[in-house]
Amino acid sequence: MHFLRMAWLNFKGQRAAFNLEEFLLLETAYPFLTLMFHCVLAGYAYGTTDLTDWVIGNAFLLCTNICVFSLGSSFRAERAYGRIRSIMAGKTSKLEIVLQKGFFSGLVSMGTTFAGFAIGCLVFGISWSNISWGSMLLCFTVAMFAATGFGLVLSVLGLMSHQMHLILNLMEYVLLIFTGSNFPITQLPEAVRVISYVLPLTRSIQAARGVVNGMEWNAVLGLLVSEILVGIAYILLAAGLVKYAERVAIKEGTLELF
Amino acid sequence: MKKWMIYWQIIVSTMTLQMKQSFARPMFRFCLICNPIVNTIFLYEMFLTKGPDAFLNHVVLGAGLMGIWGCICFSSVGDINRERWSGTLPLIYVAPGGFGLIVFGKVFGNTIMSLLTFVLSYVTAGVISGQWLYIVNIGYFLVSMVLMIVCFVVVSLCFAYIMMLSRKTELYMNLIEIPLVFICGFTFPVEVLPEWAQAISNLLAPTWAARLLRMSVGQVDKSVYVECTGILVIELLLMVLFTIGLYHWMDKRIRIRATLEVS
């Protein structure tokens, strides 16, 4: 219960500056418009009207706004608001703090991507009859778990870097290019393909496309299990990085320096 | 003659200062350098199955146009507001050179510097594909580039004055980037959009600037080119008139209400 209360407080803190107009424009209309832009672009580039794969891929990318930008700025925001000292000196485990920050962001991302997928299906005329909604929901849940872990790692980088604008904006494109959301990752040179496999979303996008295209359930499950492992690895990395940042800050006295 | 020389000096000095200030901001550096590179990689992979025509048309020009528009969104559009936050807005507002001329210098400086996005797109596309394409109709291409610069300067001025009315410039700066890229056909022809969207698209000057650029790197039909240029010029003139009207209306409102620094 304490965990949920603190997670809610963290989430409210991240969203406090948002009013309804901003939420509707920046968190709803803009991401859906981006989804439509990428789908129309894909339709033209690949000369196809069946945009199922692109609607799925770009729906997963809708989590970028929350998982990369909002969550990615959260530790930096703690420093700006003067709370970072209390967090670092407090007895609460750093892993718990990291998980609190990601909990509600992950849930909201899941809702956004799911809604994005449903709207994308309606706009681009994709039939709902072949879609197993339970399996899709599972894919979205797993994907958002991994993406939230990734966002948490980015947020911790905010304690060590002054170039967060650059890092967060660049990460948006890294996810766009390397997760296979808009073109197959086999198109990428072999040397850089490894990036795709260490990123979140790559496997869950493949799994979701598999669900729609009739892939064997065991294969889908295998992809989802790997995605969960990627998510766990990111969360552990985030907790480890917080501890490292703490040690560096104590040694150099730079915790609150910008 | 002397008066024009003074105007020129004001524009040049504002441009130089603006370029230095913009380049000092990490977000602008991202838009100017990283954005065209990653956009080119993305578009290259998307259009990999299409031929060399698509390569120059959609990858290089598409990424360049997206890059220049990104720079405008995250710099020119918010520059007046930035002056407000820096506390320098009242100073440039009452400067003897004239506020309009100073804002023009700032926007012009940003737009000229943003042309680097085209160079970076071309170089990135050349490096990743190993193909270095040449522009055959260099004359048409240069004319199209000049018209595109004029178009983006006018659009930036218009947006900058509109944004001056709002306290939420940052929010709107983030919101206008993708919609304009989408509806003006920077990366694909607007003809693939539904008819109602094409009608909106044709009312926007950047659509015609992008069309002219795309035409100039392929087979040029002189009569179609002249027709598109005519439409672009008319739309730009209407936009200039609108911007002048908006400026005078705002100037009057600011003087009556004394709200220059509080938006």
Image (cartoon, rainbow, N blue to C red):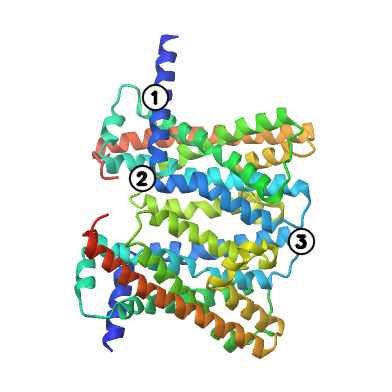
How crowded is the residue under tag 2: few (<14 C-alpha within 10 Å), some, or many (20+)?
some
Label of residue B165 in the image = 2
**Circle 2 sits in a helix, a strand or a loop, which is it?**
loop
Q: Which residue is mark 3?
A: A47
Do the residues at pointers 2 and 1 share their chain? Answer: yes
Q: Which residue is mark 1?
A: B13
Residue B236 placement: quadrant: top right
Q: Quadrant of the N terminus of chain B?
A: top left
Tell me the CA gap for discs 2 and 1.
Answer: 26 Å
Residue A82 placement: quadrant: bottom left
User: Is A248 left or right of A116, judged from the image as shown?
Assistant: left
Front position among marks 2 and 3: 3
In this picture, is A99 found above or below B75? below
Q: Chain of mark 3?
A: A
**Total numbered circles:** 3
Residue at the spot 76% in from the left edge and 36% down from the top edge: B224
In this picture, is B168 found above or below A251? above
CB under 8 Å between callouts 1 and 3? no
**Circle 3 sits in a helix, a strand or a loop, which is it?**
loop
How crowded is the residue under tag 3: few (<14 C-alpha within 10 Å), some, or many (20+)?
few
Residue A156, visible in the rendered structure: yes
User: Is A233 left or right of A19, judged from the image as shown?
Assistant: right
How crowded is the residue under tag 1: few (<14 C-alpha within 10 Å), some, or many (20+)?
some
